[in-house]
Image (cartoon, grey):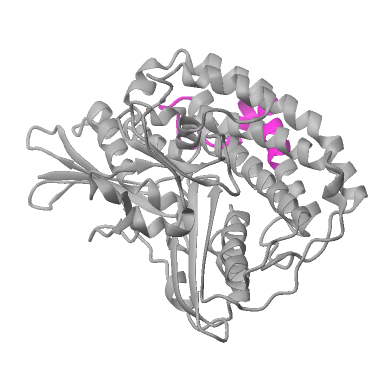
Amino acid sequence: MKEIVINPITRIEGHAKVTIQLNEDLSVKEARFQVTDFRGFEKFTEGRPFYEMPSITSRACGICPVSHLLASAKACDEIVAVKVPPTAVKLRRLIHMGQMIQSHALNFFHLSAPDFLLGMDADPAIRNVFGLIEKNPDLARQGIRLRRFGQEIIENVAGKKIHSSEWIVPGGAKWPLTRERADYLKSNLPEALTTTLQTIGMFKTWFSGCTEEVATYGDFPSYYLGLVTADGGLEMYDGNIRVMDNDGNIVADQLDPDKYLDYIGEAVEPYSYMKFPYYKPLGYPAGMYRVGPLARLNISSHCGTPLADEELKEFKKLGKNGVVQSTFHYHYARLIETLFCIEKAKELLEDPEILSEHVCRKVYANNNEGVGVAEAPRGTLIHHYKVDDNGMITKVNMIIATEHNNLAYNKAVTQVAQKYVKAETLTEGMLNRVESVIRSFDPCLSCATHAVGQMPLDIQLLDSQGKQLDRKTR
């Protein structure tokens, strides 16, 4: 058996490789998405005081630290057994909107748009954000400013754009939002809204001519999982779990996130350091499901904001019974969520209670266990802590958003490889299409593996005896 190794995948957060296994006739047999670095947060946090967990776990990632802060703080809220003040909840939701905006803008404009606008077969020396700036400087500038707006929401509420762990604490938040900062954010909302609407229009025009990519970029049936409101709407901070099948049937609804172990299992494979979560009632690997923007829109009956609700109706027309299966449409879903987050940020900033100074409770460890669940940009994020009577961590389990999609990554890269990979000619466009389907998911492997350092891109073609036939590096 021959194989091609793409190592690492480029323009994603973190390090991974794809191994493409070939049959003797050079057709693709199977492709595997392999995460190559180890994450040790679940072990090295044992023995730490519970109240340090938001600060520690947010360091798992510099792209979506707010998601870890929120999930961790919610787990700690349960340990201290207090009701978080309403204003603190609204401020937490507000920085969550900022997190979603900046992360989605990063993926769409910086990581994925070079493929859309410069071409899958373009020279990798120009198929990047710098090539995008040269070809379409206005679009690149809009993307940078939209991401900056998301980061400024976080900074103005929580003090820092990245790792703002001093602000969020078990039981609430350390300080309130000032009127001056709220007014500044409101003044920048119109530009962010205009950019997002224009980008959605541009993207819909672009993907209308990409029927082949839509049909082959991870277009397969799966289950979908995520948080929803009590009436089935889009939810990112609170709510309960809904599971839906590929025909639009709700197979489980309003599941308690605290009881996630009852319905989510975790498997391991020898070829990857990333866990393989699955839906327990179906077993492994039949219980494959997807999370993140595509899944959230599939399981939600509505968004709850006017413009996003209208766009959601258009999105659902792309799938049977309102279920959109192509992984390619993660990009469209990401833009709709950005629109929703901007509308929600406006709603929160115009709420008079957002400026209240009552944002925290005095807290102590009152329970020995806590679970915090929130929707990270890439999907459902779970933090589960156990503590002793002194509040010291005895056990941690974290299911990172990216990990939920692990089974789906392998199915998606296999589908794309079988369509495009012709082993006798290792072309740039062929290999980039395999990488591109991974970028559609926008995995955050820094979260899932806590990787450090850099690795070169190393693509190897080996025959069945392991002899190297071809090699490309960059």
Q: Quadrant of residue 134?
A: top right
Q: Position of residue 463 (x, y in %)?
A: 12, 46
Q: Name the outermost residue toward the bottom.
A: 390
Q: Nearer the viewer, residue 228 or 411?
A: 228
341 horizontally vs 296: left or right? right
Q: Position of residue 340 (x, y in %)?
A: 65, 32
Q: Nearer the viewer, residue 465 or 205?
A: 205
Q: How many marks?
A: 0
Residue 143 is covered by the magenta coloring: yes
Q: Quadrant of residue 166?
A: bottom right
In percent of the image, x 13 and y 44: which residue is there? Answer: 2
In percent of the image, x 58 and y 53: which residue is there? Answer: 64
Q: Main secondary structure of the magenta part?
A: helix
In percent of the image, x 8 and y 32: which residue is there? Answer: 25
Residue 430 visible in rendering: yes
Residue 455 visible in rendering: no
129 horizontally vs 470: left or right? right
Q: Quadrant of residue 145?
A: top right
185 horizontally vs 269: left or right? right
The magenta span reads: 119-147
Residue 242 is covered by the magenta coloring: no
148 horizontally vs 298: left or right? right
Q: Position of residue 347 (x, y in %)?
A: 77, 36
In percent of the image, x 55 and y 59: which residue is there? Answer: 61
Q: Position of residue 315 (x, y in %)?
A: 51, 21
Q: Name the outermost residue toward the right.
A: 180
Q: Is residue 5 above or below residue 88?
A: above
Quadrant containing the N terminus in the rendered view: top left
